[in-house]
Image (spheres, rainbow, N blue to C red):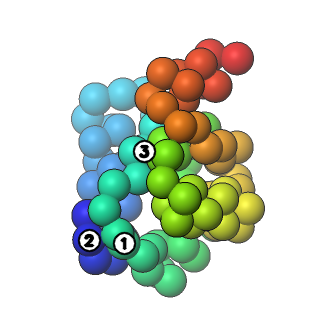
Amino acid sequence: MNDEFSLADLASMRAEIHRNYSSHSDVILKKAGSYSVSVDAQTTLWKGIPEFRNFVYVTDDGWKKESAEYAAKTYMRPYNTRIADTKEEAYEMLQG
């Protein structure tokens, strides 16, 4: 993704959870590309998305990690958001 993460993108994630998973799901998101999160999406995430239980960003890039840390401390805080360097580390975090 190299633009803005929008409410439509958030709705797409929620629809995927409803189609294929339980109502509360752990989410692992690999931060790829360069994108911002729209104010509307941040506000909606801050208020709470019932489909998200725990959230782990996967990134090993400095700038993307800083972005994930900011998100984890602010609008992604309701989801016990953590940051991992690898997908395997993210799975371990969710197991514990």
In the image, farthest residue toward the front: 62
Name the residue located 54 percent from the left edge and 29 percent from the top edge.
Answer: 90
Q: Residue at x 53, y 37 (%)?
A: 85
Does 59 sit left or right of 94 as displayed? left
Q: Are marks 1 and 2 in contact (CB under 8 Å)?
A: yes
Q: Which residue is mark 2?
A: 2
Residue 7: give x, y in percent of width and height. Answer: 36, 71
Residue 8, visible in the rendered structure = no
The picture places residue 4, in percent across and down from the top left corner, at: 33, 77
Residue at 28% x, 42% y: name it. Answer: 16
Image quadrant containing the N terminus:
bottom left
**Camera-side residue: 1 or 75?**
1
Amino acid, disc 2: Asn
SS type, badge 1: loop
Query: Could one spot residue 90 in this view of the protein?
Result: yes
Q: Report the Cα–Cα distance between label 2 and label 3.
A: 15 Å
Label 2 CA crowd tier, 10 Å (few <14, some 14–19, many 20+): few
Name the residue carrying label 1: 35
Residue visible at 61% across and 44% down?
Answer: 83
Precedes in sequence: disc 1 or disc 2:
2
Amino acid carrying label 1: it is Tyr
In the image, is residue 78 above or below residue 1? above
